Image (tube, rainbow, N blue to C red):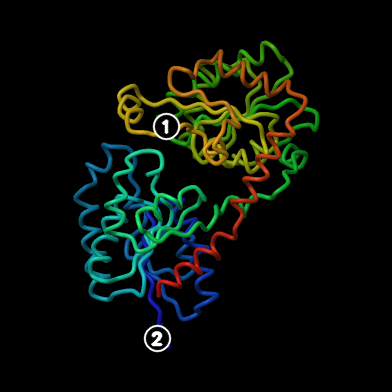
């Protein structure tokens, strides 16, 4: 029997694929006749998704790579546009990958195809004028965080807060002993997890300061142990080379993956800005956040951002739950002092209560809520 409900989707990277796969599964539970096509990754393919291109062809980073790949990206864009205009889906869902998807959504929206964008661009942090372009492209925005709703409603864009999938996936109570046993640590070990970032540029800029801060902590507490999860084999090689060069005397384990286990087993986490700060919050781990950019990039970005805070826990709480050290403030001395303060703290009751409250707020069964919101557009 031919499918009577067609849904277009484009995910441009693994994080989008991770959001889209459970969304497809939830939609199919409600509408078994649904068929999906566009661009997707391995998780989406497992759910029966028809990908017109390999998702890897969309994966670009930074400023230079997209320029080099522009001819291929334009070709893919035009092919998708022809495909969806020739055979219009009941609804199109752009999964993150903002520039590409919003451009495609604008074209489809103009042709009368309902469009949904899943994961709000960070217009609440910088470049708020993008809201006008979003209004011309998107019929509904699905947001991961509750505070993102207001700016869309103020601009007459339909928006639904669906919660964060990490809040659904990570248990409400963290089993620290289990995480330590998994990684071969003892119950009474003193452990610092270090997460310098998933990109090579982040490790290059923040890694030396993080290792220097670890050394300063080790001088004060010589029984400390350190664990550094790496995002992929390239980052593992980069981090291991940095450890050999700068801190061969420190008891450091560099892991391939296992970021959540590394954070779960730690007494405190030293973390780069980004989703890892949210993971540390959901795992109820005290943390110190730091972030460095290249000087020119920071000069540009710092003039465009309007946020009081950088760390997601602080943004979600609208107050400083975790210390932030940005750019020139991110010195090894400041980082180590903040880490030592948290290592030596005897009471974390107030912090953990705040983390639990945020976890509950974000735990919404996000895929199910997203599926229900999408089907209202059909």
Instruction: Residue at 71% x, 15% y: name it.
Output: 221
Q: Which mark is residue 200?
A: 1
Instruction: Residue at 36% x, 71% y: name it.
Output: 91
Residue 337: quarter of image: top right
Q: Quadrant of the C terminus?
A: bottom left
Instruction: Residue at 26% x, 71% y: name it.
Output: 112
On the image, the x and y values in percent for residue 118 come to: 42, 57
Q: Quadrant of the N terminus?
A: bottom left
Farthest residue toward the top? 219
On the image, the x and y values in percent for residue 254 come to: 59, 30
Which label's residue is closer to the chain start, 1 or 2?
A: 2
Q: Nearer the viewer, residue 64 or 171?
A: 171
Farthest residue toward the left? 71
User: Vertically, is 197 above or below 101?
Assistant: above
Label 1 CA crowd tier, 10 Å (few <14, some 14–19, many 20+): some
Q: Which mark is residue 359?
A: none
Q: Nearer the viewer, residue 127 or 344?
A: 127
Q: Which mark is residue 2?
A: 2
Please state the total of marks drawn on the protein image.
2
For the residue labelled by badge 1, is the local secondary structure a helix, a strand or a loop?
A: helix
């Amino acid at each position: 029997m031919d499918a009577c409900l067609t849904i277009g989707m484009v995910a441009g990277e693994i994080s989008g694929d991770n959001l889209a796969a459970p969304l497809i599964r939830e939609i199919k539970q409600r509408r078994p006749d649904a068929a999906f096509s566009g661009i997707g990754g391995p998780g989406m393919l497992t759910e029966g998704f028809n990908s017109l291109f390999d998702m890897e062809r969309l994966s670009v980073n930074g400023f230079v790579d997209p320029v080099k790949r522009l001819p291929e990206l334009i070709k893919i864009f035009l092919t998708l546009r022809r495909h969806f205009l020739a055979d219009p889906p009941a609804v199109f869902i752009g999964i993150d990958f903002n520039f590409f998807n919003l451009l495609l959504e604008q074209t489809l929206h103009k042709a009368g195809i309902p469009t949904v964008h899943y994961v709000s661009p960070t217009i609440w942090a910088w470049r708020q004028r993008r809201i006008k372009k979003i209004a011309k492209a998107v019929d509904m925005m699905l947001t991961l965080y509750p505070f993102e709703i207001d700016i869309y409603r103020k601009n007459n864009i339909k928006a639904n807060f669906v919660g964060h999938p990490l809040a659904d996936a990570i248990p409400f109570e963290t089993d620290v002993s289990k995480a330590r046993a998994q990684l071969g640590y003892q119950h009474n070990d003193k452990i610092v997890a270090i997460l310098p970032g998933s990109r090579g540029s982040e490790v290059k800029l923040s890694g030396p300061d993080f290792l220097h801060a670890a050394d300063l902590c080790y001088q004060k507490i010589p029984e400390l142990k350190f664990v550094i999860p790496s995002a992929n084999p390239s980052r593992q090689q980069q981090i291991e080379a940095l450890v050999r060069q700068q801190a061969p005397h420190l008891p450091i384990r560099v892991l391939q993956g296992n970021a959540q286990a590394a954070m779960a087993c730690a007494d405190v986490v030293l973390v780069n800005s980004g989703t890892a700060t949210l993971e540390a919050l959901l795992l109820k781990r005290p943390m110190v956040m730091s972030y460095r950019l290249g000087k020119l990039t920071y000069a540009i970005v710092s003039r465009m951002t309007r946020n009081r805070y950088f760390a997601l826990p602080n943004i979600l709480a609208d107050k400083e739950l975790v210390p932030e050290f940005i750019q020139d403030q991110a010195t090894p001395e400041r980082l180590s002092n903040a880490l030592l303060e948290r290592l030596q703290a005897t009471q974390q009751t107030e912090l953990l209560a705040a983390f639990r409250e945020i976890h509950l707020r974000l735990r919404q069964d996000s895929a199910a809520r997203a599926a229900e919101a999408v089907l209202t557009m059909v």
